[in-house]
Image (cartoon, grey):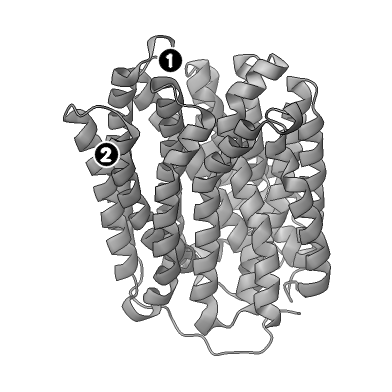
Amino acid sequence: MTGRRAVAVVLAGTFMAVLDSFIVLVAAPAIRADLGASGGELQWVLAGYQLTYAVFLTTGGRLGDLHGRRRVFQLGMGLFTLASIACALSGSALALVVSRLAQGLGAALMVPQVVAVITVLVPERERHRAFGVLGLVMGLATIGGQLVGGLLIGADLFGSGWRPVFWINVPIGLVTLLLAARYVPESRAARARRIDVAGVALLSAALFLLVYPLIQGQDAGWPWWAWACLGASVPAFCAFAAVERALARRGGDPLLRLGLFATRSFSVGLVLVLAVYAVITSYYLVLSISLQEGLGMSALGAGLVYTPAAVMFFSFSLPAGRLVPRYGRRVLAVGAVVLAAGYASTAAVLLAGLPFTPGVVIPTLMLQSVGGGLLITPSLNAVLARVNPDDAGTASGVLSTAQQVGGALGVAIIGVVFFNAYDPATGNATTAAHGLAMASLFTLTTALIATALVHALPTTPRPRPATKQQSRV
């Protein structure tokens, strides 16, 4: 019972962090109009959150292992809540950008603790269900973010425009802080010693060099510095790996134990998660643009288009966690195939010349969500099934980083594909339909890659002897 209560409390942190990655997409036009934000400033409002979120995730997981997962979760939730207040009160685009950077840092501190709490407190035989609920929460936040944003902006409470998309975090954050203090027991890695400062600096620099050009490159027209940053990220990651190996040989405590990647379920699963999130994040971005700019729909109307898909995702995510113990990776394989079929059907109906209307694309979006529910939910457990609880915080930080990097990579690639077919300046339903069809073909290809990766996962999890305490709880 204690474990269930604790998991239920910390899942609120995941929901808030994922929701804020998507809810601002709908609010972007209103923010631009109210604050007079330039294109670059608006891009930073959207991307600055993802940047600090991605860069500090692994460090956030490590801090939880060292100083206590509940303590770091509460620190992250407190920072996230305060930053949300600052976002809602922002009087300029610059103030909003700075507040969003702080929000991302808060998310990076709290999100890795969620998976760590599940790994430490939930018995292994029940962990697939907990990861199923986690995947469900993340999926609903992903799909529901734009619906919630549309409802809040459409309501225009007290003439506040876009600001309620940030105010909504405040009561949830305050209640979660109180519940965490009461129901989440403290835990930390038994063998953890001190933070690896050199590792933190090198990994942060490498992730920044990788993620920043992925986020900014499309809008900037892919200048030379974007390619230079991407190239420089390779030696930066190599330097990080060399420092971590040297520290481990000296008997030190590296930020990331590279032996984690020797586990096939972890290394292959990470690539799978990166591919899946490259599809989800990017696709809902271009779909939102297609509906609002191409069809001229309101933020609320566009959000309502996602509602049937959200229902299907919810319906299939719930049983997915229960099916995995019986059918193993076949559940993920079916999900990947159905997901690919959903994207293929969207491309087919749009390229066949059918009119681009909500009624045409909603059934294909529902098919995509059936596959997503069967794939996303159990994929998290596939990555972490064999991770030692002492490495839970670090491993979950790496997993969350893969989600954010995958999202940034997908947005960068799909942006090229979509905007080559759709020009916002002269956009209409026909060109939006063509752009969405091209984007669907890209996501179809990525979903097929995910299908191949599923078959590279181990067929059954390696059993571990049950122990009452593998970390100090």
At label 2, counting other C-alpha atoms closer than 10 Å, the crowd grade (few under 14, some 14-19, many 20 or more) is many
Q: Position of residue 345 (x, y in %)?
A: 23, 42
In percent of the image, x 34 and y 35: which residue is there? 358
Which quadrant of the figure contains the C terminus?
A: bottom right
Question: Quick check: 298 above or below 128?
Answer: above
Q: Which residue is mark 2?
A: 346
Query: What's the residue type where badge 2 is placed?
Result: Thr
Left or right of 124, for residue 354: left
Left or right of 473, for residue 135: left
In percent of the image, x 67 and y 38: which residue is there? 165
Q: Say the numbered circle drawn on residue 436.
A: none
Which quadrant of the figure contains the N terminus?
A: bottom right
Disc 2 is placed on an element classified as helix
Depth check, front residue: 419 or 33:
33
In percent of the image, x 46 and y 56: which residue is there? 270
Would you say residue 301 is visible in this rendering?
Answer: yes
Question: Quick check: 210 above or below 377?
Answer: above
Q: Position of residue 199 (x, y in %)?
A: 69, 50
In percent of the image, x 74 and y 62: which residue is there? 64
Question: Quick check: 178 above or below 349?
Answer: below
Q: Position of residue 78 (x, y in %)?
A: 82, 51
Disc 1 is placed on an element classified as helix
Depth check, front residue: 320 or 363:
363
The image quadrant that residue 314 belongs to is bottom left
Question: Quick check: 193 above or below 417?
Answer: below
Q: Position of residue 120 (x, y in %)?
A: 65, 76
Looking at marks 2 and 1 on the same chain, the residue that comes earlier in the sequence is marked by: 2
At label 1, counting other C-alpha atoms closer than 10 Å, the crowd grade (few under 14, some 14-19, many 20 or more) is some
Q: Which residue is mark 1?
A: 424
